[in-house]
Amino acid sequence: MLVQATQGQSGSARVVVLGNEKGGSGKSTLALHIAVALLKAGQRVATIDLDCRQQSFTRNLNNRRIWARHTGLDLELPEHRCIKLGETMQIADNESAEFQQFAQAVAAVEHAFDFIVIDTPGSDSYLMRLAHSMADTLVTPINDSFLDFDVLGAVDPTTYSVTGPSHYSSMVLDARRKRRQLDGVDTDWIVVRNRLSTLGARNNHRLAVNLKDLAMRLGFRPLDGFAERSVYREFFPRGLTALDDLNEATLGTRPSMGHVTAREEVTGLLRQLKLPLDERGRRRAANRAEWFAQVDKPLELHDIVGV
Ligand SMILES: Nc1ncnc2c1ncn2[C@@H]1O[C@H](COP(=O)(O)OP(=O)(O)O)[C@@H](O)[C@H]1O
Ligand SMILES: [Mg+2]
């Protein structure tokens, strides 16, 4: 449905990291949408929340679990873990405890799952850096403003031209270089513009030009993501995504045009992320969809008596 297929995955899960050194850019929202999209495509998905303070990803998934139980709906859920922050007075001890938990969480799932989706906090931390250096795919959502662009690169106030990478970009480049040296893997870095507004078109155009410029320099793929839509905020209490069957049963209210458009843009974005799908999982999902379609039809006599 949404993503590209690859042949011959190594049997080790592909790691998808959501990262940006700034809160409120859409990391947790995208993490949930990517995880659910992959589950719907028949992939085996594990998820890890490294944003130990906010835990939006974890709370979203908990809400989803509760809503599924309450309604009896079959809402897909990943195998999820949330890493707890070390609580001693010693930074080194805390980092060591966090590392242990993280390493165990990854080891527990990496061979039995196709994907590990990791959400990270909006601040520089030890775990956040570790996750960036593990990423096969790094997705960085940014809000559509110069303030958010600043997280990636500095802009000259007179000419609007990009003058250099930011602290976060330099960290990503460093993590990428180390990864390449370690096992030759080149992280696919994707910067997604989120909360796109139809207003302020002139600034948007400048941002798009600057983003392209920076993409060439830093080696990421710039993509247009989601528009600013209230439906994304409304999904949280039930842990829903734009990809779920949006009817009165799932939503608890009638779907709007906003839901339909949101689904289209989410599907489009996921296709462009080009996450390599495991073919067997994809076939399983297709067969299941066909089975559901069959079951949905009224039974005919020959189905019952086998004639
Ligand atoms: N495209 C969007 N339109 C409207 N609200 C959005 C959109 N993307 C994210 N949000 C909302 O913005 C807030 C921050 O998003 P979140 O995913 O938690 O960001 P982060 O994890 O980067 O801190 C949340 O309330 C979320 O529902
Ligand atoms: Mg978050």
Image (cartoon, rainbow, N blue to C red):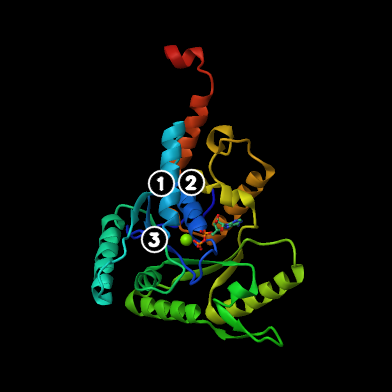
Cα distance between the residues tagged 3 and 2: 24 Å
Determine the image quadrant of residue 95.
bottom left
Q: Describe the element under mark 3 as helix, strand or loop.
A: strand
Where residue 279 sits in the image (x, y, percent)? 43, 50
Which callout, 1 or 3, points at the residue further toward the start of the chain?
3
- Residue 239 is tagged as 2
Q: The residue under label 2 is which amino acid type? A: Gly
Task: Identify the element where label 2 is drawn.
Answer: loop
Q: Indicate the amino acid at tag 1.
A: Asn
**Vertical arrangement, residue 262 with respect to residue 249, above or below:** below
Image quadrant of residue 150?
bottom right
Left or right? Give the position of 178 relative to 250: left
Q: Are marks 1 and 3 in contact (CB under 8 Å)?
A: no
Q: Is mark 2 within 8 Å of ligand 1?
A: no
The residue under the point 24% across, 66% down is: 100
The local secondary structure at tag 1 comes to helix
Which residue is denoted by mark 1 in the rendering? 62
* Viewer-side label of 1, 3: 1
Badge number at residue 14: 3
Q: Quadrant of the C terminus?
A: top left
Say if 69 sits above or below 50 in the image: above
Task: Report x, y in % for residue 98.
Answer: 28, 67
